[in-house]
């Protein structure tokens, strides 16, 4: 398997693991085949578990190399695509979603997975999060929330709780944290779920449900940074004396207000699917426009139609 460096944006490395073409009968991949480099995360980092479950998902769903697309921004969690032996990119800080949107819109045969951290998603990438959600672009965004900037060694993140002492808040964080679940619901995400890396079966369950959703699916996955925020999620981990409560069976996932109420519960709150509705995706709407346009310009290829549009803007 060859690893090809593609043209990189200034300051960041984009890498594509280009699998060799396979002939003959195709089988799904095993974890061994899809695991690339040895992850460079600190021993005990919650991100290991998320990666292992992604491999499990690939294996379980018998996915093929060329159908796996893993995109991320910058951060410890965003190193994710480096460790997956398939197509992917470690893109610009906070810009994973627009990059992934382009792939999703142009390749309806793929399901795009985006992984990243709380800083990447809600600080520098905050706007992209809102707009990708409201456009209902078909992809899965799994934010590995550790309530801190890990890669840059302990700065306050948008999800750090009040009072958290960091390099940027020596006396404790004074800014109110954002609530990722509320943010996702109010932005228009059509699938909003919450899980924690300490419950592997649950993570896999959420990933599968997200992948099967036709629209923008968002998962907040608590993933402890053992180096800079040790014990942050103990209250949600039964092995550390905490409680893991699943979303009540009576919860109506199509009820936006009920989902919002769940999102407002005090930590550790509930885990599971908070919100899930079916709405036309941007993918479907664009495909519809293209189809009707193509009937008027028979004989032209997609790129020629696009070129015509650009020419019109000149
Ligand atoms: C444009 C730009 N600004 C700032 C940085 C520095 N930087 C890299 S990762 C990061 C935050 C990472 O935090 P998070 O997304 O929570 O990921 P984690 O490391 O915690 O997994 C920052 C500020 C950068 N690489 N590029
Ligand atoms: S610094 Fe924190 S988030 Fe980064 S690899 Fe280490 S434990 Fe994980
Ligand atoms: Mg983080």
Image (cartoon, helix red, strand yellow):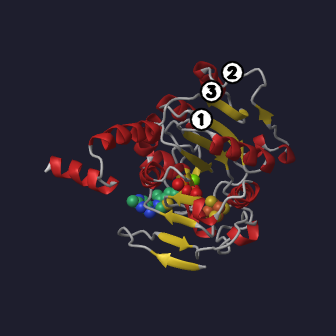
Q: Secondary structure at mark 2?
A: loop
Q: Residue at x 42, y 51 (%)?
A: 98
Residue 272's image quarter?
Answer: top right
| Residue holding disc 1 | 191
- Ligand 2 shows up in the quarter that is bottom right
Element assignment for label 3: loop
**In this orientation, does residue 147 appear?**
no
Q: Which residue is mark 3?
A: 264
Report how far apart the C-alphas of labels 1 and 2 lie in the structure: 13 Å
Camera-nearest residue between 87 and 93: 87
| Label 2 sits on residue | 252
Q: Count neighbours of disc 2 (C-alpha within 10 A) and say few if under 14, some if 14 to 19, many if 20 or more.
A: some
Q: Position of residue 81 (x, y in %)?
A: 58, 64
Residue plotted at (52% across, 29% down): 279
Q: Is residue 31 above or below residue 163?
A: below
Q: Quadrant of residue 115?
A: bottom right
Q: Residue 78 location in percent, x, y?
A: 55, 60
Q: Residue furthest front?
A: 299
Which of 184/313 is in front? 313
Q: Is residue 279 above or below residue 43?
A: above
Label 1 sits on a secondary structure element that is strand
Disc 3, disc 2: CB below 8 Å? no
Q: Residue at x 63, y 70 (%)?
A: 85
- Please identify the quadrant where the N terminus is shown: bottom right
Q: Earlier in the sequence, mark 3 or mark 1?
A: 1
Q: Position of residue 208 (x, y in %)?
A: 70, 45
Residue 273, numbered label: none
């Amino acid at each position: 398997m060859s690893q090809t460096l593609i043209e990189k944006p200034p300051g960041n490395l984009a890498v594509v693991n280009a699998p060799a073409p396979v002939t003959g009968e195709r089988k799904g991949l095993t974890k061994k085949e899809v695991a690339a480099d040895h992850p460079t995360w600190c021993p005990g980092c919650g991100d290991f578990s998320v990666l292992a479950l992604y491999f499990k998902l690939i294996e379980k769903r018998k996915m093929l190399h060329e159908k796996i697309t893993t995109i991320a921004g910058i951060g410890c969690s965003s190193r994710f695509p480096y460790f997956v032996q398939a197509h992917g990119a470690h893109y610009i800080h906070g810009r994973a979603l627009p990059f992934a949107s382009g792939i999703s819109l142009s390749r309806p045969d793929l399901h795009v997975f985006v992984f990243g951290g709380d800083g990447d998603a809600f600080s520098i990438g905050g706007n992209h999060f809102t707009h990708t959600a409201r456009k209902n672009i078909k992809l899965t965004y799994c934010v590995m929330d550790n309530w801190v900037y890990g890669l840059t060694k302990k700065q306050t993140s948008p999800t750090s709780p009040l009072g958290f002492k960091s390099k940027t808040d020596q006396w404790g964080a004074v800014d109110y944290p954002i609530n990722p679940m509320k943010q996702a619901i109010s932005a228009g995400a059509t699938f909003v779920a919450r899980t924690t890396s300490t419950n592997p079966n649950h993570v896999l369950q959420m990933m599968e449900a997200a992948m099967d959703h036709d629209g923008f699916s968002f998962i907040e996955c608590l993933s402890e940074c053992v180096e800079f925020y040790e014990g942050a999620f103990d209250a949600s981990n039964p092995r550390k004396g905490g409680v893991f409560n699943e979303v009540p069976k009576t919860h109506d996932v199509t009820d936006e207000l009920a989902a919002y109420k769940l999102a407002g519960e005090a930590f550790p709150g509930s885990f599971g699917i908070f919100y899930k509705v079916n709405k036309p995706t941007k993918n479907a709407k664009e495909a519809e426009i293209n189809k009707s346009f193509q009937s008027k310009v028979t004989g032209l290829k997609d790129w020629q139609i696009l070129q015509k549009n650009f020419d019109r803007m000149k």
